[in-house]
Amino acid sequence: MDRASKLQKLEAVRRKVPAMSAAAMSGLLTEIEAAGLPELKGRRHIREATEHSVCQHSAYGPMLETVTVDGLDGRPVQVLLANLYTLLQAVWTVSSSFRALVRRSTSNSQQIFKLVYYTDEINCGNPLAPDPSFIERTKLAAGDNHAIANMPGGASQLAAIVLRNIFHHDIVDPSLGFNLKAPCGTLQRLRFQLGAFCQDGQAHKLLFSVKGDGGTRCCTLCNVVTSGSVESEQTVVMNRATREDQLELTTDSSFAQSIISLLEKRATLSKGDFALWEQASGLVYNEHCLIYQADLCKLVKPVSQWCHDYMHAFFVKGIWNRVMWLIMTQVEQQLQRDVYQTCGEYMKTWVLPKSRSENLPSLFAPKRRQSNKDAKTFKCTASEGLSAMVPFLFFLLLIIGPLGICQEQIAAYACLVNVLELLQATALGTTTTPTNLATAITAFLEACCTAGWKDEFHPKFHWILHMPRQLARWGFLPTCFVQERKHKVAKRYGGRTTNTQGYEKTLLMELLGHNIADLQEPDVFGTAARLVQKCKAPNKMVQFMTECMGCPAEEIFTCSSVQLEPAGGCHRGDLVVMRHGMQIAEVWFHCSFDGQLYSLVSFLETVKHEKQSWICRKTEECMLVSTEEIKSSLSYSRLNDVDVRVVVPLPHR
């Protein structure tokens, strides 16, 4: 069959089936070609297959459980839950990668893990709903927003149900431990306790029934007062501490005493006076909410378990957004010209690693200027802010700085970048310590005061003072970057589901099935360098590798991108920093030669070392190296046809 006939046949098949993306159809046909056509293929069979893969597991009770509570309208509200212990046993049975990860992380049978509780609201895009919204709780509980709104305690009551289901389980006491049985029959004992609540500020407010930014005491962790409300973007922190030792910290016991006092005052004060007491204490009373549940009071400790997410603190109407808007505004006032256009042109010289898709010049488009002015913040996504953070610093240092204006503001922004680089490095566990993080945060806040921004502090400027103590407590700072990306999974299935009667069950079943299937992939949690996908190497590459290695290989695979050791990625065409010699190189290709991973790179000549960057010159000196020698991919700015300014991440300097 000639190519034209093959294309015509493919097009005919595509038009006969329900609409799907080209990538989805390509993946489906490839899988059928490799594994064969399934014997069952009806719509009912597909639903039955998902239910079977999820509900066949019942080691610690049924996979799906339902809890019924009374609604505000008097009708019962049903909350659908996944049984965490049965889910863990299911994953333990099917995933060798998960078993290896837990065993690597377990030093002895008495080790106690910490459970991090994450909550967020997700718009799944249900096409039949006038208000397409859905709420997800850590892949364990799901519910329609309208149903949750009908619960007397709302999302906080839902959190209490989830935590009660985990820690007051009918069969398991996680503090004493439980066994997971591998397919070979060996047992692994696990113990865990509640460690932290990592979520955005709104979720913290809802779960812990605190007024947060809208209360006189805007910070649950200390005695801080505010003026205004965060909803109006006009909240001002009245206690503008710049060092942690200036804070009046509270404790779990004092927080518990505040709850007791609130309950006592509710019995004696009038409705108006009690509202004033709530405003002063920063608490909101609702007997159904999490912190008012007597059986959970020893489990939930809002002060010691409160974990500020630096992604939301800095990049979601956060500190970086406010500082960006302030400095852009002040530079424009000094120059009396449109700085957005100048910055947009400068951003065109920057090249990000291929794994990043952000369009930096678009952040400084003309329409953005007015939008930012109206909002009094620099509007962009967290990923865009993270990518633009360092290039904008060089714009200030190299373009604005030499003009002799806004020197104090530029210094404040440089301090901000230093804080963010330290926070990013906490995942590696070597560069950042609580002491140097606290020093950097203090330097940034004091620089902001020197720059004249003290009156611009909103509550998130205060949040960061607590991060060094939280880093000391847990050894790292979890963030919501990864969890926010996982919203795509819920949206993928929720947007296509039109069965509104069984919407919650259908979506939760799909989420569980998807995650169980994902964890069955080999080496999911591996940290060694590897090809992202094995593809057949072209003949020229096979010939080249055979000549370089001096012998033929049984199998040679290639891929444009690889996973680096221990984390990160690298794509063909990226600039990278090598582990030994701190050399900069450009990647030409990656390949696997009989299971060993190699990359062809051309080394750059280092012309000049600077504090945060190197000036390098491209050469034609190529070498085949082990991919394990690549440390990280880099962002760079083109200075001319051969010279580039390469930004070296803080842990690799």
Image (cartoon, rainbow, N blue to C red):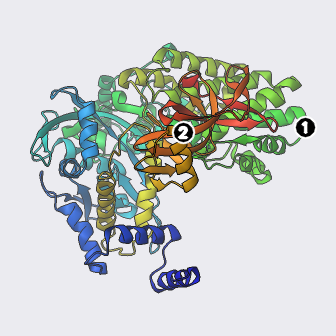
Q: Residue 548 carries which label?
A: 2
> Relative to 434, does residue 635 appear above or below in the rendering?
below
> Relative to 601, does residue 367 appear above or below in the rendering?
below
Residue found 22% across the figure and 29% down from its top: 112
Residue found 84% across the figure and 41% down from its top: 342
Give the side of residue 228 with respect to residue 496, left or right. right
Estimate the spatial distance between the alpha carbons at disc 2 and disc 1, rounded to whole Å.
60 Å
Residue for badge 1: 336
- Helix, strand or loop status at disc 1: loop
Please identify the quarter of the rendering in which residue 643 is found: top right
10 Å crowding of disc 1: few (<14), some (14-19), many (20+): few
Q: What residue type is labelled 1?
A: Gln
Q: Position of residue 280 (x, y in %)?
A: 45, 32
> Relative to 41, does residue 472 appear above or below in the rendering?
above
Q: Position of residue 638 (x, y in %)?
A: 77, 37
Q: Which of marks 2 and 1 is in front?
A: 2
Please identify the quarter of the rendering in which residue 504 is found: bottom left
> Does residue 149 appear anywhere in the picture?
yes
